[in-house]
Image (spheres, coloured by chain):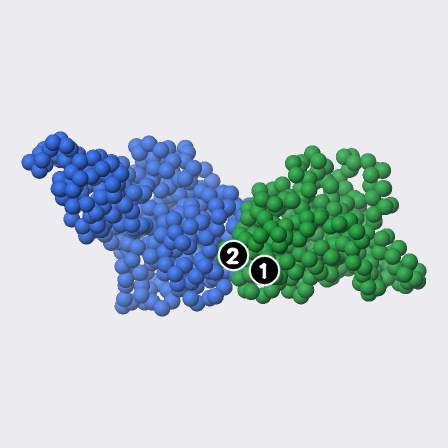
Amino acid sequence: MPIQVLMPALSPTMEKGNLSKWLKKEGETIKSGDVIAEIETDKATMEVEATDEGTLGKILIPEGTADVAVNTPIATILADGESAADLAKAPAPAKPAAEAAPPVAAKAEAPAPKAAPAPQAVAEPDPEVPAGTEMITQTIREALRDAMAEEMRRDADVFVMGEEVAEYQGAYKVTQGLLQEFGARRVIDTPITEHGFAGIGVGAAMTGLKPIVEFMTFNFAMQAIDQIINSAAKTLYMSGGQMGCSIVFRGPNGAAARVAAQHSQDYASWYSNIPGLKVVAPFSAADYKGLLKAAIRDPNPVIFLENEMLYGHTGEVPKLDDFVIPIGKARIVRSGSHVTIISWSNGMSYALKAADELAKDGIEAEVIDLRTLRPMDTETIINSVKKTGRAVTVEEGWAQSGVGAEIATRIMENAFDYLDAPVARVTGKDVPMPYAANLEKLALPSAAEVVEAAKAVCYR
Amino acid sequence: MAAPKKAAASSPQDKTDGGSPPAFTREQELKALRDMLLIRRFEEKAGQLYGMGAIGGFCHLYIGQEAVVVGMQMALKEGDQVITGYRDHGHMLATGMEANGVMAELTGRRGGYSKGKGGSMHMFSKEKHFYGGHGIVGAQVSLGTGLSFANNYRGNGNVSVTYFGDGAANQGQVYESFNMAELWKLPVIYVIENNRYAMGTAVSRASAQQDFSKRGASFNIPGLQVDGMDVRAVKAAGDEAAAWCRAGKGPMILEMQTYRYRGHSMSDPAKYRTREEVEKVRHDQDPIEQVRNRLLAAKVSEADLKAIDAEVRDIVNASADFAQHDPEPDAAELWTDVYR
């Protein structure tokens, strides 16, 4: 029976790609290991090698096709003795792509980027953006890159260092093009040595330079956490204000997809515990850009928590010469009067989906994107809770000593008399992240859990 | 950034030849004597104040090691940075930081270099290019490498002198830093102050390679073993290392063989070594006595030396007085300098 060649998943988080080129023609003989096609993902152009031998029977997806979902059949290979007439016998695609490649909850619930360009669809206009501003659609990855490039053009003291940031163009392609524009003096590939280069970054910052230190993921920053906390966060205080540290530590944080416990931890609560640090964890493309620019300019050390699942998501980014969003301000992205849902980063995916679901049942949720975790915009939370009387926090991190625990405490301290129900938390489950697709999905929060929690605090 | 590596042949010799280092001029001898005496008297006073309860927490005295920082400082030029660990009082005084400000920091007063918020292990001076004062063993090595990274980035011709001890030399980030410093040819002098004991652990019990000048060997970083009790030898090595760095050849390691007379900290009974061992070093190698004897041999009068003694004692006594009478920080200072 003819063999189907499926669109491969070329990274843990890839959902689709562009079939940029066929290197074999129909009727050509194919040996195992031959490069048959080139596929462009949002991170890189990759070669597809044949794993089966035979003749390329039929190309199902022509070259130049964009957004081909993972696991879509792209060609058939005929075995020896088979002919084009056998093509009809090729099995139908077993499952739609989304099911065939078991995604994590986040992936399943976040709308496909191009189909719904704004997963962060908002009801409320962003107060940071003047009415009538032209918007451009770009991925979060591009928004981050533009933020760095703009700040590097503006200030010669800003430089980027980290693993694979320069010649490789970024492990997640966030620093794409920076080496070409700014050169190797300012876009610096480091060895795999987090503790060392974090310390070098902090030392450079103590002299007044403004490093952007990229961690390939924040999981690896645990090797460097002594320098982040003991050196970066505390020096200003320990020096009586004489010597500070303007530095950004950035990179993907939290769960990606199917990378298991050591690569899937959310460090939001860890860093938000530390005086001297600012901690930013945006969700929308515009916020990623405006807040990264603010972080680079900030005279303090800033932990900038990104989310790998969001890198390929697109959103509307204001076309302004200098779009900077102040650190420390939450944003009400959806107004409502029945319950306040508070989240940040990828937690907003669940929160917004839940708000849509709740609306169908007549519950109008007010959704707050915290955006900054330290300093926390308590005022926006409290004002909302005073209006709704109910609150649900949503985070991918663990519950114990989590950010949601902090938010609940602040609500209790500042709006106890306004509460009609105890604050509910939706969090990651209290286990290391499992690898198995079903268990991973269970370990993460879901929109259904947010809906359930919101209904519970509404006594519905 | 990654310049091609120079052949090992251009490295300096691995060890000093054991001969006498270049002689100092009389002015240099007098300056070295005065600066070392200031550190010694300051540290003796700090020990007294600690005993009186005026200084709290940890207090690590530098007595015995004075020639290292004084000799190195004589090899530096304006703008060169200094960074070290927690045994830092001597380094601060050597860079020219005021005794008053250092002592008042030890007593936790508002006139201290960190307004009383840093203490013995955490002081800084932008003006004197002193970058701390770090309490986490080995952390200053990456930070000091970062200072030299900034020098390289700015192309300012300055070097960073990064001090650490024989104990810190076993920390992992030291080698991460060595690798990048050589890879990027950063102008950093790694001064390993080998005082023979990491707290209570003798070098022989903690270090597989006890020749610290070789600790950069696998990164092609040249190193010298230096008699850290002879201020002239220290300066000569410092000159060589600074020239190496300023020529763009990358980092150099100087192992300073030195000795601390006091315990690791004020609360250390120092049971891990004999009284005789300490006495022998004091008697045979004391860095201050070496200079004093040379000056006397060169017919400098006792009176002139006593005048230096008196000047130093006045500075130290005044600092102790200041540090005990300066007010504690205002309560409002609790909340300042967290962010700027």
Kindly give the residue lying farthest to the left in the view shown: A85
The residue lying toward the viewer, choosing from B216 and A119, is B216
Residue B110 visible in this rendered orientation of the protein: no
Give the residue drawn at x 71%, y 55%. Answer: B237
Q: Label 1: which residue? A: B248
Give the colour chain A carries in the figure: blue
In x, y percent, where is residue A345?
37, 49
In x, y percent, where is residue B315?
81, 61
Give the colour chain B carries in the figure: green
Q: Is residue B332 above or below residue A450?
A: below
Q: Label 2: which residue? A: B3
Q: Disc 2, disc 1: CB below 8 Å?
A: yes
Residue A22 lies left or right of residue A201; in this view the side is left
The residue lying toward the viewer, choosing from A14 and A33, is A33
Mark 1: which amino acid? Answer: Gly
Mark 2: which amino acid? Answer: Ala
In x, y percent, where is residue A287?
36, 57
Give the chain letter at badge 1.
B
Query: Image quadrant of residue A434?
Result: top left
Count of marks placed on residues: 2
Give the residue drawn at x 67%, y 42%. Answer: B167
Crowding at mark 1 (Cα within 10 Å: few <14, some 14-19, many 20+)? some
The residue lying toward the viewer, choosing from A346 and A141, is A141
Give the residue drawn at x 42%, y 47%. Answer: A216
Q: Is residue B204 above or below residue A185?
A: above
Residue B212 lies left or right of residue A49; in this view the side is right
